[in-house]
Amino acid sequence: MDYVELHAHSSYSLLDGASHPEELVARAAALGMPALALTDHDAVYGAPAFQRAAREHGVKPLFGAELTLAGGHHLTLLVEERSGWHNLCYLVSRAQHAAAKGEAFLSPAELVGCTGGLIALSGCRQGAIATALRQGRRRQALAIARRALRLFGRQNFWIELQNHLLPGDARLQRELASLAAYLGVGCVATNNVHYAEPSARRLQDVMVCIRHLTSLDACHALRLNAEYYLKPAGEMQALFSEHPEALANTLRLAERCQFELAFGVQELPQYPTGGMSSSAYLRRLCELALEERFAPTDEQARAQLLHELAVIERAGLANYFLVVWDIMRCAREKGILGQGRGSAANSLVAYLLHITPVNPLARGLVFERFLSDERSAVPDIDLDFQANRREEVIQYVYDRYGRDHAAMACTFATFQARSAARDVARALGLSTAVAEAAIAYLTTGETPAFLSEADQAPLALLLELCAQLEGHPRHLGIHSGAMVVTAAPITSRVPTEPATMPGRSVVQWDKDGLEQVGLVKIDLLSLRVLSAISDTLALVEETTGETIDLPGLTYDDPAVYRMIARGDTVGVFQVESRAQTQMIPRLQPRCFEDLVVAISLIRPGPIQANAVHPYLRRRAGEEPVAYLHPLLQPALESTLGVLLFQEQVLLIARDVAGFTPGQGELLRRALGARQAGAEVERLRGVFLSGAAQRDVPLEVAEQIFEQLKAFGSYSFPRSHATAFAVLVYQAAWLKRHHFLPYWTSLLNNQPMGFWSPSVLVGEARRRGVTTLPVDVSRSRERCSMEGDSIRLGLNYVRGMGEGHAQRIVAGREQAPYTSLEGFCRRTRLPRRLVEHLIAAGAMDGWGVARRQLLWQLAALRYEAEEPELDLSYVEDEVSLPALSDTESLLMEQGVTGVSTGEHILAFYRAWLQARGILDSEQIRGCPGGRRVRLAGLMVVHQSPPTAKGTHFVTLEDEKGLVDVVVRPRLYRQVRHVLRQPLLLVEGIVQREGAVSVLATGIRRLEG
Ligand SMILES: [Zn+2]
Ligand SMILES: [Zn+2]
């Protein structure tokens, strides 16, 4: 083979390249190319995927980019060595920051001083030299070439020849070659590849049309033929028969480029330790914490600490731990709640540094699952912070390390076949009817009847192109919490781009890409339950002066477990969902470990692997603990023989089939990946032969593997579940012992959790806690406690902005509001918002009916925000009838999402009772098998994919919640009825721990 492609675009040349980097590499390998360059437009988005694919195919990856210079001129750059990569990243960043989002622009002057380690090719037809030659300006072409030669040096500047058989190509090639000969620089042939194989040409055309919002017929930016594919050497030889040295030079350049994308923890900024080594500093911190938090006689803890510190030191991770510790310390000092999640909870060091909340020794967690000598990768530490203050933590990191050293990870939005249908149809010039037909087909799998015979063929083409387009990157987004921090300026490691959010920049790699190349990211996630807990603590302190010591909780309060075991978990993190409240009364949690199990059981993995019911039966002593094979016992013993935790997959692979930890990790990933069919099959082979060597019968081994497959990786690691269980307990403890402040805080941190605020308000009512309506004279900006009640905050009124609420509060500090006119005069709120306040009952305090107020408002000559206004209304009294109870309730519900008075079902109760229709409390008292009728407000409607078409509906009345199961056959009959809020259900009571009703009929309840 004597040709290497040095100029290729992947689909990361957004809406220009039509092949994934993996496809380009696979094609290059099939053609026998020893190397391949990736030169996307002003970006290195595809570099991590490209490198991984290249390694797999044994093709040498060459990194580069095609820069867009002033005037739209293109310049091809290749990285020869590390300094070249640094310069490339810097140049791409400059180009990205100099132009609008999604475009790039680099002034040639910026190249000065930034060309080391880079090889420049003169570019495609749009290169500055080629453009000048095509326009007959030979002198100018020569001047540009001389400048480039001075910039890059004779070894590193090459004239790029292309031949796409277009008119003028041959002539341009000759002129470029003679210019090169005149200057004494070399020529190199490239094909400006935009897709791996010729068949993708149409997809590429469509992409370009989508980019220009036009159709194939109208688009002038299209490539004129299908010659932009990855060509075999033979075809290139024919095209460049006059310049064989230009082909040979591609090999020489490929040979010269020696750079590999590989980073690591050494890229992190150094935490300042005042001259001490990071390891010594870390040891000192941990020893101090050990003295403080463990008994001096605790030899086990001391030994574990020494062991972990030694592993951390050998892995060179001491500084990494200090950086993470520093972030947590900052949060603690600011009073921001936060804790680490994931496998970090396996580490005593992380516990001592207050990174994670659980003592791994007390919970039987194993450090090696977090970090070990054989696994060299940087361990994942994800930090959760209270949602409303996470931004402060992000800003701290920016301030601490500087804006040039910190940036957020990006995300790639990709095309979906269905959402792309309209764009593709426009590109193809097809009618909207065909586009609608495609969308219908992609939604239901059926071709709609309205399509004419003539439209059938275009539809087929449209569907094919939509399918091809699916998964290609469309545009760049910002990851909300993943940060990259580097000691060197970040733009020397990976290019950055401006983000839509001011003052932010994003790096050109997403989380997967960063992990792939080893550039350390720190995940700063947000968790609303932490905000709710933090608010509760503040409210308790404010109202009682009591300070709650959350970390001091001992996880053994029987009252808390009794509450959870009853299924009384609405408002409790992770265990409040319908599925949880059905399961938990059977599980009967009695201790912290049971909470770990509870939140791990209701995950897609254990559900799909049919682990839930066997676990519950075994725990209740209804069936013996059994194993498919004795070799499974060590892995599954602690979970009664069922697969519950992610790490059990690795243990089973080890014990049954002799997998190394590395192979086990591969298996775990493959099982979790969406499209890893081939890889899973390969590992299945390895698994079965490994099992055979251990005398596991084939059919048993196959069964075990099927279970692993069903389990997938949609499950918690034990450590992660343990860290989350801490929050479950804290939330439950607050609900049990500080209901009023906790509930107020939940209402202030919506949306969060499983239930709507309306259900939360109902739940409070059933516990005897009244929620008071919004009141312009009493409500604060957020919900507050008022005696033994909760007062809804002004924030619950639809359309209320922070500034509006502040104006209401400030206005009443001057004097109490006594009339609508006075209120409007002082606050000057938008008329619509005043309407909402009236509807919410916020002005009921004046003793004027809501209708009357609305009438007054309409008569008020009143413009919001006007500095001087003539407020007057015509006294024209009209007495309207007061609203009926249900009417005002619906009004309030409409503008606040909750109703504070009676539950709507209470108004119908007498009527329902007379007809023998039960309330939820009566249902809970019914024996299993009883036929019943009940009525309620639908508050949840779910059909989880694991339930195979069964729907779950939760009804609420004034006494509580009832779960209703709707089997697929009934669902098909009543799907339209289920859009109504008020339902009448007939069915059979089921009692399996929790009570539910298996529906036999559902009707709309007429109001
Ligand atoms: Zn170009
Ligand atoms: Zn190009």
Image (cartoon, rainbow, N blue to C red):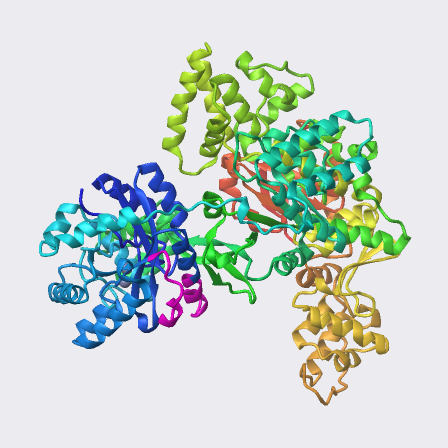
Q: Position of residue 836 (x, y in %)?
A: 69, 69
Q: Is residue 932 visible?
A: no
In the displayed structure image, the side of residue 652 where residue 753 appears, left or right:
right
In this rendered view, identify the residue nearer to me: 583 or 646. Answer: 646
Point out the residue furthest to the top here: 695
Compared to residue 670, the image places residue 482 above or below, namely below
Picture quadrant where residue 627 is located: top right
Q: Position of residue 699 (x, y in %)?
A: 43, 14
* Quadrant in the picture for the C terminus: bottom right
Image quadrant of ligand 1 equals bottom left
Compared to residue 265, the image places residue 147 above or below, namely below
In this rendered view, identify the residue nearer to me: 618 or 154. Answer: 154
Q: Residue at x 25, y 54 (%)?
A: 193
Picture quadrant where residue 56 is located: top left
In the displayed structure image, the side of residue 245 where residue 385 appears, left or right:
right
Q: Residue at x 41, y 59 (%)?
A: 87
* Number of marks in picture: 0
Q: Residue at x 29, y 49 (%)?
A: 256
Q: Is residue 109 magenta?
A: yes
In this rendered view, identify the residue nearer to me: 882 or 65. Answer: 65
Q: Is residue 349 visible?
A: yes
In the displayed structure image, the side of residue 22 where residue 409 appears, left or right:
right
Q: Position of residue 689 (x, y in %)?
A: 40, 17
In this rendered view, identify the residue nearer to me: 846 or 481. Answer: 481
Picture quadrant where residue 455 is located: bottom left
Compared to residue 546, the image places residue 705 above or below, namely above
Q: Is residue 47 magenta?
A: no
In the displayed structure image, the side of residue 526 where residue 197 appears, left or right:
left
* Quadrant in the picture for the N terminus: top left
Q: Position of residue 198 (x, y in %)?
A: 20, 50
Tell me where the magenta segment starts and ends, as one range.
91-118
